[in-house]
């Protein structure tokens, strides 16, 4: 008799930065740290478009095909349903609070960028 093994669920990570946030290095460090902490897990990456993440993807620092773009506000229900394990957020406190309250869950880990 063989045992059927359920496929592992993916760990979902959202990068959300305000339009004024410019610290590319902080984003890359946060994603690198999450990658190392979750090396044994399958991951899915999502992002809200902002200049800093656009520069990272345009420069080829991360493979664009690995990241899925979401539209803030318009896809809030979809984002909430994804049950992100991590939300990496950069920008002012009001922006961060709105993102976390809109799509964060009780088990979501917040990585707050400065």
Image (cartoon, helix red, strand yellow):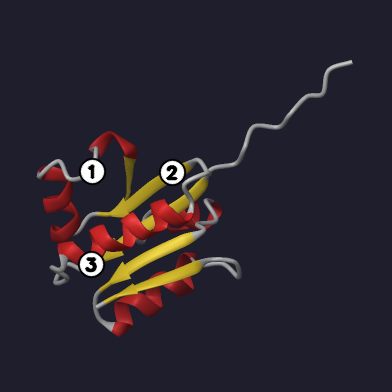
Side of 19 where 95 appears, left or right: right
Residue sitting at the far right: 1
Graded by Cα atoms within 10 Å as few (under 14), some (14 to 19) or many (20 or more), the crowding at tag 3 reads: some
Q: Residue at x 50, y 40 (%)?
A: 42
**Where is residue 58, by image quadrant?**
top left
Residue shown at the point (43%, 43%) measured from the top left = 44
In depth, the one of 8 and 81 nearer the eye is: 8
Residue farthest top in this picture: 1
Q: Is residue 88 above or below residue 98?
A: above
Mark 1 / mark 3, whichever is N-terminal: 3
Q: Residue at x 43, y 58 (%)?
A: 76
On the image, the x and y values in percent for residue 95 come to 30, 76
As displayed, is residue 51 above or below residue 114? above
> How far apart are labels 1 and 3 at the CA level?
14 Å
Q: CA distance from mark 1 to mark 2?
A: 13 Å
Disc with the residue nearer the chain's start (2 vs 3): 3
Q: Can you identify the residue that label 2 sits on?
A: 44
Which mark, residue 62?
1
In this view, 90 is above or below 65: below
Tell me whether the residue at label 1 lies in contact with that at label 3, contact meaning CB atoms closer than 8 angstroms: no
The disc at residue 26 is: 3
Horizontally, is 56 left or right of 87 in the view?
left
Residue 54 visible here = yes
How far across and down, in percent of the image, does residue 5 sit?
Answer: 73, 29
């Amino acid at each position: 008799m063989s045992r059927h093994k359920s496929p592992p669920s993916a760990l979902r990570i959202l990068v959300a930065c305000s339009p004024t946030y410019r610290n590319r290095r902080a984003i890359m460090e946060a994603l690198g740290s999450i990658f190392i902490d979750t090396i044994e897990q399958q991951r899915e990456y999502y992002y809200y478009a902002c200049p800093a993440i656009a520069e990272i993807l345009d420069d080829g620092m991360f493979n664009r095909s690995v990241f899925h773009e979401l539209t803030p506000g318009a896809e809030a229900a979809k984002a909430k349903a994804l049950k992100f394990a991590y939300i990496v957020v950069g920008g002012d406190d009001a922006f961060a609070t709105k993102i976390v309250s809109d799509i964060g869950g009780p088990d979501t880990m917040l990585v707050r960028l400065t």
